[in-house]
Image: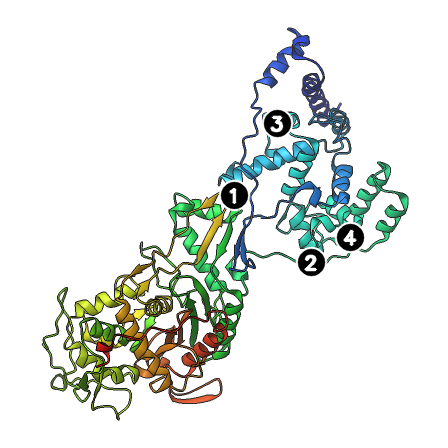
């Protein structure tokens, strides 16, 4: 006899012993086995672990907009568990027919199947013997290891020892004692892999036929029942011929077992495969409507200890834990925002400028829109960019937000100087000399919490302080200086103020350095007119503080996060607080309404039939341009400029953008136009209320 024949015979004998033990365990009471050899083997079998202490299968997490529509999904395995009654009876009958025809008869292992497989093995052949229950156990063990991040411990096929297989058999027996057949079948169909990233019958039905599992037809269900045997060999996308042949085997089995009549069988065998592929996609790269907001939400989860001890644990929860993440995003308004930034300059345009819109709700901090004109893609290509224009680089705890770090804010900083002017008891009607342009080195700026330096000193070769145009170097009110955005008036007002208090005013509204998340720095006088980088979200929220009568709320993007078991995870609240006097806020909103009627933003095409205010901003070289403004219902920051640097090649002067020539791009131009379109679209839903009048003393 050849060695291979001896080996098969020995394997056959050994397996028969094991099978005998299992049969005895299933059929005979342990007490009847006495002290026989079989009894001793059964005692050994009884000592194997019999618990199925595994985590629930990995599930996808879903990010929802504020109307319940899906923004994105996150998953390591695309799975949507459904009840057995939400699965077509054809898939239930088909999977039993082809995988385990005695499923409803055995107690977890099929001794008849095992004996048949052993004979086939002894004869040099190969035949499977695992029941659906055993396959379910095997999948659950694998899922448990994957969910716990122990993929290195997963064993497949030939890697398994006799001990591993015995344990799986015992677990199958234990499972049958604990759960009904329908519960086991439901669990199996929710966990088994159907190829191409589809785990479970619901995902597979949508992936290959674009229908829910409940709507699978007989030929569709039979095709999917055949795939599980080998998702690579029976891949519907690459091997449709193999799938049809296997499907027809399933149909034959169903006919033989009396699960379908001949007429249905014959019609199904003749049916084409009929794929209607709807491959699922996950992550923010596939969040078509709001990829950058999606990334913001993802970072909020990954940075928050409420979702795990470290980032790896939080990532596992996000990708495996089946979270439902309710967010604040308004999808209808987001669509408008995205259309506007895309229209401002297409991502692939050779000019390679950036455009962004971000909105928050005053008094709640809810982030309503977050759009930019680049493509959320890490691949190197014009217009591809994964940094978020709207965000700072870091959060308040120093953790990454994937933000661009903000941009120089220009004259949108001036309202905070103006606010401190009012806060110090002064009137906006006070006239100051706008002709003063020289501030010598060593000028005695007052700063009670630090040192402020800087100069505009021709004696040192410096240019005198400029205004945007040559026609406003005269005496005017502080109010006129603000709505016309006159640098020299802002500086003249600052000569009478404590820079420490200006900084506190800006900080109270939430204005922070876009790179460090520290309070806006006023150690340099140049920062009075916005030479420091601030994120658009923080600017939108700062102006929302004025719109909310001086109440500052932290931006919030998460409304609620719930696990599949109904567990609610804590999410950060807005922590709304009165940080600016209501009277000061009223004075600022009063002044900034003039920007849109007779000031630097009078050409912006926004609906002025209701109370609305704004401030424009433009930096040196017109490189960064802004319009930021609000009603009591919504506050929006609009930015257009360079996200790749501030050198000479990025100035926006003598430039044609989208077919229109600009001698010098201004904040009221592209930034103002897209801001106006968004605010006009938002007006019916976020109507707001009239702003209160400021105290009379501020107007004298």
4 or 1: mark nearer the eye: 1
Q: How crowded is mark 3: few (under 14 residues within 10 Å), some or many (20 or more)?
A: many
In the rendered image, the quadrant that contains the C terminus is: bottom left
3 or 1: mark nearer the eye: 1
Q: Give the residue at x 46% y 88%.
A: 660
- Residue 220 appears in view: yes
Residue 241 sits above or below residue 35 on the image? below
Residue 362 sits above or below residue 694 on the image? above
On the image, numbered disc 3 is attached to which residue? 171
x and y, in percent, of residue 618 in the image:
33, 80
Q: Nearer the viewer, residue 559 or 142?
A: 559
Identify the mark nearer the N-term, 4 or 2: 4
CB within 8 Å, label 3 to label 1: no
> Left or right: 8 with respect to 385?
right
Q: Give the residue at x 68% y 13%.
A: 29
Disc 2 is placed on an element classified as: loop
On the image, numbered disc 2 is attached to which residue? 277
x and y, in percent, of residue 553 in the image:
35, 60
> Left or right: 452 with respect to 411?
left
Q: Residues within 10 Å of mark 2 (few under 14, many from 20)?
A: some
1 or 2: mark nearer the eye: 1
Looking at the rendered structure, the number of numbered marks drawn on it comes to 4
On the image, numbered disc 4 is attached to which residue? 241
Disc 1 is placed on an element classified as: loop
Q: Give the residue at x 13% y 83%.
A: 460
In the rendered image, the quadrant that contains the N terminus is: top right
x and y, in percent, of residue 698 in the image:
23, 77
Disc 4 is placed on an element classified as: helix
3 or 4: mark nearer the eye: 3
On the image, numbered disc 1 is attached to which residue? 566
């Amino acid at each position: 006899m050849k060695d291979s024949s001896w080996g098969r015979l020995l394997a056959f004998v050994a397996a028969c012993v094991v099978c005998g033990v299992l049969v005895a365990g299933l059929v005979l009471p342990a007490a009847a086995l006495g002290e026989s050899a079989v009894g001793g083997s059964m005692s050994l079998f009884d000592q194997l672990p019999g618990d199925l202490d595994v985590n629930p299968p990995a599930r996808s997490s879903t990010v929802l907009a504020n109307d319940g529509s899906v923004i994105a999904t996150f998953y390591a395995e695309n799975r949507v568990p459904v009840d057995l009654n939400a699965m077509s009876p054809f898939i239930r009958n088909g999977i039993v027919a082809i995988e385990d025809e005695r499923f409803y008869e055995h107690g977890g292992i099929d001794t008849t199947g095992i004996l048949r497989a052993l004979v086939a093995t002894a004869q040099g052949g190969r035949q499977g013997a695992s029941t659906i229950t055993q396959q379910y156990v095997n999948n659950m063990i694998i899922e448990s290891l994957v969910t716990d991040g122990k993929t290195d411990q997963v064993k497949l096929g030939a890697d398994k020892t006799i001990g591993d297989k015995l344990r799986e058999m015992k677990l199958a027996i234990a499972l049958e004692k604990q759960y009904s057949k329908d519960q086991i079948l439901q669990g199996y169909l929710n966990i088994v892999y159907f190829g191409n990233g589809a785990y479970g019958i619901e995902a597979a039905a949508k992936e290959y036929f674009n229908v829910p599992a409940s709507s699978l037809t007989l030929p569709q269900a039979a095709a999917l029942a055949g795939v599980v045997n080998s998702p690579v060999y029976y891949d519907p996308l690459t091997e449709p011929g193999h799938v049809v042949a296997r499907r027809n085997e399933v149909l034959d089995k169903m006919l033989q077992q009396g699960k379908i009549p001949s007429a249905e069988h014959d019609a199904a065998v003749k049916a084409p495969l009929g794929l209607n592929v709807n491959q699922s996609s996950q992550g923010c790269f596939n969040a078509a409507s709001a990829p950058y907001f999606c990334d913001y939400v993802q970072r909020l989860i990954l940075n928050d200890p409420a979702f795990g001890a470290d980032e790896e644990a939080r990532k596992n929860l996000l990708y495996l834990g089946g979270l439902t993440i309710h967010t604040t995003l308004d999808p209808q308004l987001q669509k408008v925002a995205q259309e506007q930034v895309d229209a401002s300059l297409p991502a692939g345009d050779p000019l390679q400028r950036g455009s962004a819109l971000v909105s928050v709700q005053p008094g709640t901090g809810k982030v309503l829109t977050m759009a930019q004109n680049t493509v959320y893609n890490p691949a190197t290509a014009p217009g591809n960019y994964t940094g978020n224009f709207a965000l700072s680089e870091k959060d308040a705890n120093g953790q990454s937000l994937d933000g661009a770090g903000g941009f120089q804010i220009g004259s949108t900083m001036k309202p905070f100087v103006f606010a401190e002017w009012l806060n110090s008891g002064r009137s906006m009607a006070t006239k100051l000399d706008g002709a003063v342009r020289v501030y010598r080195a060593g000028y005695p700026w007052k700063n009670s919490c630090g040192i402020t330096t800087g100069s505009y000193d021709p004696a040192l070769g410096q240019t005198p302080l400029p205004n945007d145009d040559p026609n406003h170097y005269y005496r005017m009110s502080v109010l006129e200086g603000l709505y016309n955005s006159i640098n020299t008036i802002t500086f003249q007002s600052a000569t009478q103020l404590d820079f420490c208090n200006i900084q506190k005013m800006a900080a109270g509204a939430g204005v922070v350095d876009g790179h460090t998340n520290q309070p806006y720095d006023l150690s340099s006088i140049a920062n009075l007119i916005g030479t420091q980088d601030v994120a658009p979200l923080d600017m939108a929220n700062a102006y929302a503080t004025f719109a909310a009568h001086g109440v500052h709320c932290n931006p919030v993007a998460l409304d609620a996060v719930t696990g599949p078991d109904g567990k609610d995870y804590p999410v950060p609240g807005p922590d709304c607080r009165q940080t600016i006097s209501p009277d000061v806020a009223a004075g600022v909103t009063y002044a900034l309404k003039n920007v849109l009627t007779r000031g630097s933003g009078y050409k912006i095409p926004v609906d002025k039939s209701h109370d609305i205010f704004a401030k424009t901003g433009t930096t040196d070289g017109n490189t960064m341009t802004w319009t930021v403004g609000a009603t009591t219902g919504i506050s929006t920051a609009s930015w257009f400029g360079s996200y790749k640097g501030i050198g000479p090649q990025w100035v926006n002067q003598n430039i044609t953008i989208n077919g229109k020539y600009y001698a010098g791009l201004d904040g009221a131009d592209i930034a103002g136009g897209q801001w106006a379109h968004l605010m006009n679209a938002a007006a019916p839903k976020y109507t707001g209320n009239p702003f209160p009048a400021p105290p009379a003393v501020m107007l004298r």
